Amino acid sequence: MKTRVSVVAVMSFALVPLYVLALSVLSAHLSCTRSFISIGLPVTAIAGLALSIVALQRVTKSEGKLLGTFLAKLGIVLDILALVAWCGTMPDDDRQRRPACVNNLKQLGLVLGLYATENGSCYPPIDDFRNNFIFDGNAVYPEYLVDTSILACPSDPETEPETNFRLHDNKYHPNGSIGTVHPDCITDMSYCCLGWLITTDEEAEAFFRAYDKLALEDYDRDIVVPEGKGNGGGNVIHRIQKGAERFMKDPSITAHEIPLMWDKPSTDPANVSHVPAGGYVLYLDGHVEFIRYPGKFPMSETMARLLDERPRAPIPDCDEPEIDIR
């Protein structure tokens, strides 16, 4: 009697190892590695588990004609281990960290509100370092913002309390101590705060086109844009301030719909803090809301693209120097 190894048993054993091998080889070329792990791994493991069960049934019923019991059982073990490993990774961790992200934004809302109260109702201007899409650190820290750790989303893979927003050198900051928080080092690593009243993708497109040509002295002023592209259908994008809804010329738009600060979106899933993809948004009235990506502004594909198109250059003394391996 001829015997042969069950093809299904071989497939059930090899499915997860081949998937992991392919992922490790291609990860350097994939912009969505995180999605492949969070979605692809459990799907592959479940498929492998189903194949292993089918293989065991076929081998048992073959009356010795098929081999592969060991491979099928080993496949079951690998599939279960893959599922256990997946259950302990980012989706669960992110769910645990989400309340902290919400709390960060609510605290930042209080900080920005206090600044506005003491500065003519205007929120702080955008940072003067080009493409650093967050408020000017020197305007807020340390007078209003005492704890800079709330500027780092707990789910952001770049979050590292010992190094975030701190000096790595003091060549350009001779009065600063290496390892200490410095306002020049405050970046949009996790959150965006543009400093202007922007509520739609169309306004965002007009804003960024103007921002690219904006002089530093205009960072604390309203921006003139083409007619129909500004707030309320006009030609001005106003600096964001308390009561900014009056500029929208639409009584249905309230502070509840005006974003003030939010998780930085990206077209690259690997750079998105939360799984499933999305982010928290702090609105002008102080409430925080989670929006799936892609979704409504500012968690839109347009906003993510506009930000990705404008990478920030390294800030002297603040960003860790890149090692040249050439």
Image (cartoon, grey):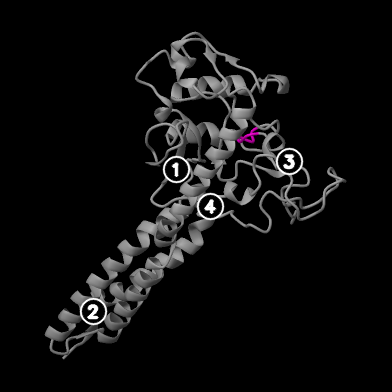
Disc 3 or 2, which lies upstream in sequence?
A: 2
Disc 3 or 1, which lies upstream in sequence?
A: 3
* Residue at horizontal 53 percent and vertical 38 percent from the top: 109
Q: Position of residue 170 (x, y in %)?
A: 83, 48
Disc 4 or 1, which lies upstream in sequence?
A: 4
Q: What residue does disc 3 label?
A: 184
Q: What residue does disc 2 label?
A: 6
Position above or below: 89 against 273:
below
Q: CA distance from mark 4 to mark 1?
A: 12 Å
Q: Secondary structure at mark 4?
A: loop
The reply to whether the magenta stretch includes residue 33 is no
* Residue at horizontal 44 percent and vertical 16 percent from the top: 248
Q: Is residue 108 left or right of residue 285?
A: right
Disc 2 or 1, which lies upstream in sequence?
A: 2
Q: Secondary structure at mark 2?
A: loop
What kind of residue is marked 4?
Asp
The crowding category of the residue bearing disc 3, from other C-alpha atoms within 10 Å (few below 14, some 14 to 19, many at least 20), is many
- The count of marks equals 4
Q: In the rendered image, which quarter contains the N terminus?
A: bottom left
Q: What residue does disc 1 label?
A: 280
